[in-house]
Image: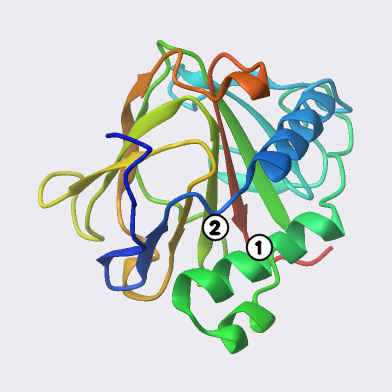
Amino acid sequence: MDALLPRPRTVVAPGAVHVPGWLGPDAQRQLVEACRAWATGPVPMRHTRLPRGGVMSVRTVCLGWHWKPYAYTRTADDVNGAHVAPFPAWLAEWGRRAVADAYEDPAAGAAYAPDTALINFYDAAARMGMHQDKDERSPAPVVSLTVGDSCVFRFGNPETRTRPWTDVELLSGDLFVFGGESRFAYHGVPKVHPHTAPPALALSGRLNLTLRTTGLTD
């Protein structure tokens, strides 16, 4: 896809909205710098091991709550036992603006209260199989931000991992929000396009931040 051509806001499915170029260059650089700091700890970025022994090809670090398949905890007992880094207020505010802009509904944005972020780093070989985000106890939307290399984002349906699905090209700075009827749709990343990140980011790979509302309390 030619990034020089206009890319309009697109409703991919009911409740699922793609907003191209939502993050400007300065905001993208801010996220890259923040992610580099978060990746070093207190819980370091790592390849998550799945219950059946498989290891995810993406590397992950969490904020607010630590995610391990398939639960949230405040401490990363499967990594180093440390308390997860806090979820920053400024990122929550970005989440509220993202929901308001995606749905063109200021009230929906004001009501959004994310308390965790999963940050996945994709190198050129990383993939994400079709899955549902269903470990949260809240039906609030998921806010997904892409920074760095572009990718193919496969957005499916809530019933099955198989078709029908829509492949969406996500470029650095793009926003994707899914909630409502599409909150539990299967989705994945079958391909990352290496060496497509904006040069000013000095980043090789794709960072994907997903903001969520766990519905959990201490």
Residue 204 sits above or below residue 186 on the image? above
Furthest residue to the front? 4
Residue 136: image x %, image y %? 56, 60
Q: Residues within 10 Å of mark 2 (few under 14, many from 20)?
A: many
Task: Say the numbered circle drawn on residue 95.
Answer: 1
Q: Amino acid at mark 2?
A: Val
Q: Is residue 210 above or below residue 207?
A: below
Q: Residue at label 2?
A: 143
Task: Kindly tell me whether residue 61 is visible in this rendering.
Answer: yes
Residue 153, percent across and down? 33, 39
**Is 155 left or right of 204, judged from the image as shown?**
left
Quadrant in the picture for the C terminus: bottom right
* Residue found at x 37% / y 37%: 3
Do the CB atoms of the residues marked 2 and 1 lie less than 8 Å apart?
A: yes
Residue 70: quarter of image: top right
Q: Quadrant of residue 124?
A: top left
- Look at the image and tell me in which quarter the N terminus lies: top left
**Residue found at x 63% / y 36%:** 119
Marks 2/1: CA distance? 7 Å
